[in-house]
Image (spheres, helix red, strand yellow):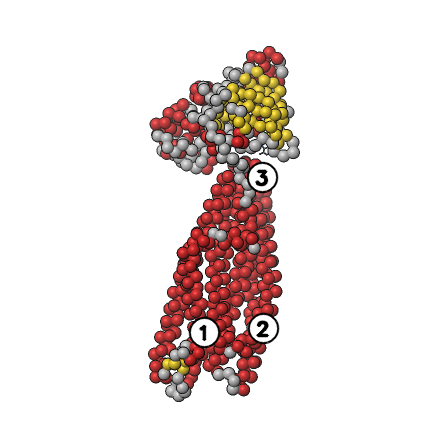
Amino acid sequence: MNTYFRLLKFLPRYKGHFLLAFGCMVGFALSNGAMAYLIGPVMKFLFTSGGGSEINLVPFDLFTVPKEGMMMAIPVAIFVVAAVKGLSSYGQSYFMGYVGQGIVRDLRKMLYDRILNLPLGFFSNTSTGVLTSRLTHDVNLIQTSTSDAVTQILKQSLTIIVLGAVIVSLDWKLSLAAAVALPLSIYPMQKLGKRMKKVSTQGQVTMGALTGLLHEAIAGIRIVKAFCMEGYESTRFQKENEAYTRNQIKTIKVRSLASPLMETLGAFAFAITIWYAAYRIGQGTLKPETFISFFASVIMFYQPIKALNGVNLNIQQGLAAAVRIFELIDRPGEHDTRGAEISGVNESIEWRGVEFKYGAEPVLNGIDLKVRRGEVIAIVGSSGAGKSTFVNLIPRFYDATGGAILIDGRDIRELSLNSLRSKIAIVSQQVILFNDSVKRNIAYGAVELSDNEIIAAAKAANAHDFIMRLPQGYETVIGEGGVRLSGGERQRGSIARAILKNAPILILDEATSSLDTESEAEVQKAITNLMSGRTTFVIAHRLSTVRNADRIIVLSGGAIKEIGNHDELLSTGGEYSRLYSMQFQG
Ligand SMILES: Nc1ncnc2c1ncn2[C@@H]1O[C@H](COP(=O)(O)OP(=O)(O)OP(=O)(O)O)[C@@H](O)[C@H]1O
Ligand SMILES: [Mg+2]
């Protein structure tokens, strides 16, 4: 129920359109009632033409048309009522559609903004497939349940009220007989609704798995082919595909049960009504034309009830989707105090007893380090030692689970996240580029820069030459994740991006690992230029790039094992000298 009210809260933004839609629904319901009411007099007119008395076209004998006028009045009345009904039906679905699409657009935006804002840890634990399925499939389900269901509920309820009024005003005793089936239908309707909700939730889970597999297989298609795993992937997909189909068939079973169930109950009520009406007509206490109007109204009355029941199922499906969407929207985003702004590093960056764990085991433990402004710190250690983790704590991709990192004595958690991150340029192990032009990839996050500045940065990163060789130069679109570039080209692109960002803190995580020795030497020059005056953290497997650092820290077992410059560490003959000698022997 709570979820329902949350969805309704989106409505006030569209109250103009909603009120128009509501007006049309009222028009629709009234014209429906008028249509039902007209049927009796029409029949009487048809079968008694020539003889008989005048006929009431309006209830309660308000307005009696003389017999001679009927020839014209009846067709005109039928046409006018039908026109009003058609027009209001159109208006109602247009205006409600507008409201529904609006709400869904707002939800999509909210959801997308939240996803962008979630901490990195969330993405390690949630598959892209699940997120995609939330944003597409679930949002669509809500669309059906907002615009369609709300339309149906209002329109059909209004129709029920109007027709109900017509029925009762025609003959209240007869209406009681027709109503006996109503209470009988409540229990099965509720039961079906609950079942629908359950089946729908299951369906979404499998749909998420299905999109997840699809995404993985497409993203990793080279690996799939290289390992001849097409069969394996196909079987994996087929399993989920089957599960989803079974679920959809369950949905169909529940959905298709609703209509015949209601019809059978309706027929039962009809049987009783007809029996009672025949008795009353025989007694002379019921006029045949009243009964015909009554009969028509009751037939028309069951249609909205049936529709409402179908809507109930839609709503259950939509609510289940809304629960999943709100669950995501309600997740805490990255913790941002929007606190102090910083202009850079004035004095130092300091680690105080920093501990970090992804799961139960700490990856970093008891890290104490003070880095002066402008210092170049190299971080070495074997693979998995925690080097990337160490630098990822600086832009708060992850928050330390113990201790604190301070810039100029201020805990980075007290700084504005935007301000902190805008002072850090990163060239990382995973060079992610976007499916856009080379130019916009290099200028990512700095849209206001001129072409000359972009070209200068590309030249400094030794990227200008290869970019000029691309078919459309700087305007070449490089494919998803930059697939149309070589590994080294991608890396130079992201170095150019870091050069453009011109931030006081620089993080290079294996920034030159994909380059050959020659281009590395070239790029190294650019990087050396870039580093001057900046506080820099360099991670490199090739120790030659590490030699010139002011200080080198050796990470091992989650702690800083050694610290010092190249010559100092070599002379102590510890881990660093071991790694270094291995480099030059192997
Ligand atoms: N998102 C994550 N969730 C859980 N564990 C992680 C995550 N990222 C890294 N780890 C684990 O943390 C440890 C340190 O990883 P990290 O990436 O910091 O190593 P690294 O020193 O950069 O290694 P490499 O030289 O191979 O890049 C590894 O054991 C890794 O399995
Ligand atoms: Mg790493």
User: Which tag is nearer the camera, tag 2 or tag 3?
Assistant: 2
Q: Assign the C terminus to one quadrant of the image.
A: top right
Q: Which residue is mark 2?
A: 180
Q: Amino acid at mark 2?
A: Val
Disc 1 and disc 3: Cα gap in Å? 59 Å
The mark lying in front, picked from 1 and 3, is 1
Badge 2 local density, few (<14 within 10 Å), some, or many (20+)?
A: some
Label 3: which secondary element = helix
Query: Do callouts 1 and 2 mark residues in contact (Cβ within 8 Å)?
Result: no
Q: Quadrant of the N terminus?
A: bottom right
Q: Is residue 566 left or right of residue 40?
A: right
Q: Position of residue 367 (x, y in %)?
A: 60, 24
Of 23 and 394, nearer the camera is 23
User: What's the residue type where badge 3 is placed?
Assistant: Asn
SS category of the residue bearing label 1: helix
Q: What residue is at 42 percent from the left and 80 percent from the top?
A: 61
Residue at the spot 63% in from the left edge and 34% down from the top edge: 359
Q: Is residue 518 left or right of residue 272?
A: left
- Name the residue tied to disc 3: 125
**Which amino acid, mark 1?**
Ala
Residue under label 1, please give it: 36
Q: Tell me: is circle 1 under 8 Å from ligand 1.
A: no
Q: Which is nearer the N-term, disc 2 or disc 3?
A: 3
Percent of width and height locating residue 289? 46, 81
> SS for tag 2?
loop
Residue at position x 43%, y 26% from top? 502
